[in-house]
Amino acid sequence: AMKIRPQTPAPVTSEDISILWDLSNTKYIPIKSSDNTAAEDTMKTIVLLSCFICLLVNPSTAFAPATKLSARGIRSQAEVCSSDRIRYAVESHLWSSSDAVNGDILVSGLDKKDSSGGDVNESDESSIASKDLSAAATSQPQSTETESESLQLSLDEKETTPSFPLVLWRFTRPHTLIGSALAIPSISLLAAPTYNSFFTTRTMVALAYAAVPSLLMNLYITGLNQITDVEIDKINKPNLPIAKGDLKKSTAIGVVLVALVVSLIMSVCNPVFSTSGLQVALWGSFVLGTVYSLPPFRLKRHPLLAAFCIVAVRGTIINAGFYSHALSAAFSATKEAAAGFGVLQCLLNDWKCALSSLFFGVFGIVIALMKDVPDAHGDRIFDIKSFTVRIGQKRVFHTMKNLLVALFGISGGALLKWATMSPTLGATTRRGLTGLGCLLAGYFTNKESKGVNPEDSGEVYDYYMQLWKLFYLSYLALPLVK
């Protein structure tokens, strides 16, 4: 350190002076920057130490990006810590406002925000610097080693990697997994001849045998989409496990391959429960999920084909497939009777299967297109020609919202009309309440959309997740209309 006694200097400006803060005696030492390059190097070292001290004094304060101390005002590079909030300023910034005192160096700040969230103007910046320096001067750390150890412990806590089960749960895209888990028992209960016939050992076994491979197939489809969309997800969904770095791509590939193999084996290995309906549901989902994400097909680049894949899986394949499986595996007395409950026969001859597939097919269209609205930025960069990219976020958002409101309105009205013609009081009550629920769902779908900016990805994504909750409720209410 250069030992220069502080004296009363003539007024100077930031263009011709660099300020060093002598940590040994907390004195301010003016040194001409143009006369001594060694002084500049010393200043950088001391300011860096000052940054660490202020971090230890007030670790919640995020260091503002620093600018190099020169008349040119060239922006310096800041070394970014693993925390998203804390940045270490490698070089300092001398504030030159009229209220600044010679010797004030800003070593920390709140990114132009004070702790209460208000903006910090330039007239307040010098006082922020002085307060931070005062806090650093009054705090007397015992040693540099202690400071470094404390800082390292703090950083280690922030960098703690989440457990693999938690990462795997996030990798499954839980909102889609929950949808599949609710769909299978609801469709089975809808297919049951009576409510009592559903609660049997055979039905529970058939239900479990369908649920396990179906959830594994759901994991395969959503996992494959994440594996092939890593770069896009870094923009659109940076918190997904692979995009965030919590899950290695090679590990993810292993997980989806195991899920796929087990799922397809279960679809064919059991002579009783590996029904044609289950095979259609699993193999159909496998084929469409693969061509949707995987090159060279990658149908997600084409809006009509992408929408078709999602609607086919969420509408026809899942609903008709599991409806057929329930009739064949749980509610058929003989093998010959089970053979008559193919997927196509159910769609053509059973109104419950046909109408439920139609309802969730339309709902699938809404989900398929609404999910692209918050992803417009990344899709545009990577040339994914979704409907949102082609015609705009506002048009897709409002069109899908109106379609879902219309779906709930028509379904609610039809159920209320049907309730008046039901032969029993129980059927009238169930269908009437379900109809009212549909009308309320349509009302809230429209009401919640009014506060959403279609061009704000965060707001649209929150709204989109609300639609998934209505999707869950629709499956829970489905058996009430039988």
Image: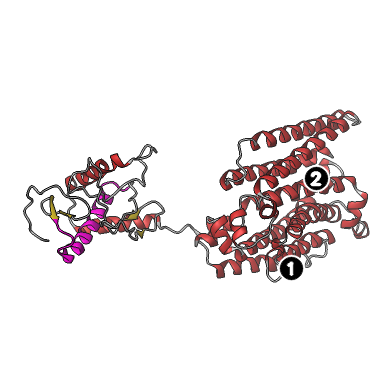
Residue position for label 2:
359
- Of helix, strand and loop, which mostly describes the magenta segment? helix
Query: Which quadrant would residue 44 be assigned to in this image?
Result: bottom left
Decide: is 285 above or below 128.
below
Residue at 75% x, 61% y is 285
Magenta-tinted stretch:
31-59
Q: Position of residue 14 (x, y in %)?
A: 22, 52
Measure the C-alpha gap from mark 1 to mark 2: 31 Å
Task: Report which residue position mark 1 lands on.
Answer: 265
SS at mark 1? helix
Q: Circle 2 — which element?
A: helix
Q: Is residue 242 left or right of residue 294?
A: left
Q: Which amino acid lies under the numbered mark 1 shown in the image of this protein?
A: Ile
Coordinates of residue 12 in the picture (x, y in percent): 16, 50
Residue in the image at 60% along x and 41% along y: 453
Q: Quadrant of residue 255?
A: bottom right
* Membership of 34 in magenta stretch: yes
From the image, state whether disc 1 or disc 2 is nearer to you: 2
From this view, report whether residue 452 is shown above or below residue 260. above
